[in-house]
Amino acid sequence: MAFELPPLPYANDALAPHISARTLEFHHGKHHAAYVNNLNGLVKDTPLASASLEEVIKAAAADLPAKQGVFNNAAQVWNHTFFWHCMKKGGGGKPSGKLLAAIESDLGGFDKFKEDFKNAAVTQFGSGWAWLVVEGGKLKIVKTANADTPLAHGQKALLTVDVWEHAYYLDYQNRRPDFVQAFLDHLVNWDFAAQNLG
Ligand code: MN3
């Protein structure tokens, strides 16, 4: 059973003007799709072909650098599927309940969270991701390079933003900070992050 490209959880134009339909056409329809196709090619006729995506990521992470190609593509498939759900039309605002309480106790409050998350996203040198994760029962903001993912580090992902240039270049060119600000102010799906916290 080959891995499949999951559909976006909204229409291509749902996040405009903050992320254009054209960006989502390329980012989901070309970049994300390419990771799925590459992964299928790499695991074909190996035991990993019948494993779950999470199992492939963990198995490849435990066998680096031999499995770097498998890891990169599998992690990018997972990261992108997760990222699409981190956004919604009319998102942004503030979380509530248990998640807000955890942000206040572990991260110094919601305003401090926004500042630190944005800083992680902006200072990730080159391609990568910024994340809100749970590690050892506490919330943490981390950044990862290239395809790297919290799953490979015993962390549970709650929220992410993709800061590869392909995520924002058509809409923001070099202005990554503006993209991250728009993500925080207008796109974050806090209900999804709260579900991940459980
Ligand atoms: Mn991407």
Image (tube, rainbow, N blue to C red):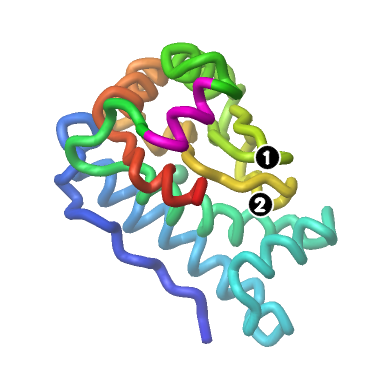
Q: Mark 2 points at which residue?
A: 151
Q: Is residue 56 above or below residue 155?
A: below
Q: Which of marks 1 and 2 is nearer the N terminus?
A: 1
What is the x, y in percent for residue 87? 32, 42
In reply to whether residue 102 is colored magenta, the answer given is: yes
Q: Distance between the residues labelled 1 and 2?
A: 15 Å
Mark 1 neighbour density, 10 Å: few (under 14) some (14–19) many (20 or more):
few
Residue 126, quarter of the rendered image = top right
The residue depicted at 41 percent of the width and 20 percent of the height is 176
User: Horizontal placement of 173 versus 129: left or right?
Assistant: left
Front-most of residues 14 and 68: 14
Q: What residue type is labelled 2?
A: Leu
The residues colored magenta run 97-104
* Ligand 1 is within 8 Å of the C-beta of the residue at disc 1: no
What is the x, y in percent for residue 128? 57, 35
Q: Which amino acid does label 1 sit on?
A: Gly
Front-most of residues 140 and 124: 140
Q: Name the residue under label 1.
A: 137
